[in-house]
Image (tube, rainbow, N blue to C red):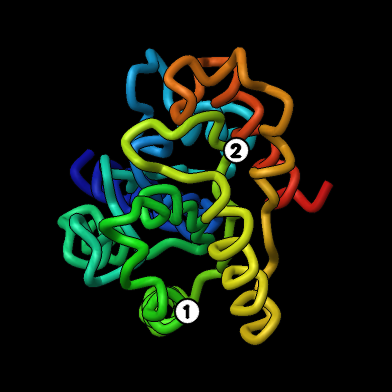
C-alpha cells in the first residue's frame, strides 16, 4: 500500500511538473488601467478567460506608475515590478506611458527612451527570456490629472514605436483600439468594463497571433 501511495504521489508530481511546463505565463505590466481601477474585473482577468487554461495571466499593474525613473511613481521602483520578475513570465505585456504624460513627469521626457529600454532589457535577461509586447497607451479623452493625449500621441507613442523597431518587438496598438470609445472612459482616462474588454481582446489577438 505504501509503495502504491508513493508511486501515486510521484505520478502526480510528474503530471504537475509537465502541466506547469506547458502553461504559458503572461505578465501584464502597467498602471491603474492594468490594475483595474474602479472595475469589478480587470483586463488581465478578462484576458486570462479568453486565452484559456493553457495560460496563466498575472496582473502586475499599480496605480500612477511611470516608465520614467524620475517620474513621481516609477514602475521599476515598485514591488509589483519585482513580483513580475519573480513570476518568470513567458510573455510580458507592457502597458505604461499614460502617467508619464503628466507635465510634472514629462519634464523628464528626454529619459523616456532610455528608461523604457532599461525596463525591456531587465525582462529580457530573466531566465524565462520572455516574449515582450509594447502597448501604445489607451486613448485619453480629457485633461484629467494633467494626463495628456496630445503628449501621448506626439511624444510617447513615437518613442515606443522607435524602441520596438530597434529591439524587434511587437506593438499592441491600444490607442487605436480604444479610439471612439469616449462613453466607455467615464473619467476620461480609465475604461469601464466594456473599455477594459476592448483592451483584453486586442491584447489577446496579439498574443494568439490572430
Report the residue at 32% width, 53% height from top. Answer: 10
Residue 49 in sight:
yes
Query: Is 113 or 109 nearer to us in this picture?
Result: 109
Report the residue at 38% width, 74% height from top. Answer: 119
- What is the crowding at mark 2: few (fewer than 14 residues within 10 Å), some, or many (at least 20)? many
Q: Which residue is mark 1?
A: 113
Q: Which label's residue is closer to the chain start, 1 or 2?
A: 1
Query: Is 50 or 71 nearer to us in this picture?
Result: 71
Residue 126 in sight:
no
Name the side, left or right, on which 188 lies relative to 138: left
The N terminus lies in which quarter of the figure?
A: top left
Query: Is 130 or 67 nearer to us in this picture?
Result: 67
Q: On residue 139, which mark appears? A: 2
**Percent coordinates x, y for residue 102 in the rendering:** 35, 51
* Depicted 94 relative to depicted 137: above or below: below
Compute the Cα span from label 1 to label 2. 20 Å
- What is the crowding at mark 1: few (fewer than 14 residues within 10 Å), some, or many (at least 20)? some
**Percent coordinates x, y for residue 123 in the rendering:** 40, 74
How many marks can you see? 2
Name the side, left or right, on which 15 lies relative to 158: left
Identify the secondary structure beneath mark 2: loop
Amino acid at each position: 500500500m505504501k509503495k502504491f501511495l508513493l508511486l501515486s504521489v510521484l505520478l502526480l508530481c510528474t503530471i504537475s511538473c509537465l502541466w506547469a511546463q506547458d502553461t504559458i505565463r503572461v505578465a501584464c505590466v502597467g498602471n491603474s488601467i492594468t490594475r483595474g481601477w474602479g472595475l469589478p474585473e480587470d483586463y488581465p482577468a478578462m484576458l486570462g478567460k479568453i486565452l484559456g487554461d493553457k495560460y496563466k495571466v498575472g496582473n502586475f499593474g499599480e496605480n500612477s506608475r511611470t516608465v520614467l525613473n524620475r517620474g513621481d511613481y516609477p514602475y521599476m521602483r515598485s514591488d509589483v515590478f519585482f513580483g513580475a520578475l519573480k513570476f518568470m513570465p513567458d510573455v510580458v505585456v507592457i502597458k505604461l506611458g499614460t502617467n508619464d504624460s503628466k507635465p510634472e513627469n514629462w519634464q523628464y521626457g528626454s529619459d523616456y527612451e532610455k528608461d523604457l529600454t532599461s525596463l525591456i532589457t531587465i525582462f529580457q535577461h530573466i531566465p524565462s527570456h520572455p516574449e515582450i509586447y509594447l502597448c501604445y497607451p489607451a486613448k485619453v479623452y480629457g485633461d484629467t490629472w494633467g494626463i495628456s493625449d496630445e503628449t501621448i500621441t506626439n511624444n510617447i507613442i513615437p518613442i515606443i514605436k522607435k524602441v520596438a523597431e530597434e529591439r524587434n518587438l511587437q506593438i499592441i496598438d491600444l490607442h487605436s483600439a480604444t479610439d471612439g470609445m469616449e462613453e466607455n472612459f467615464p473619467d476620461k482616462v480609465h475604461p469601464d468594463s466594456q473599455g477594459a474588454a476592448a483592451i483584453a481582446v486586442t491584447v489577446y489577438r496579439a498574443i494568439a497571433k490572430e
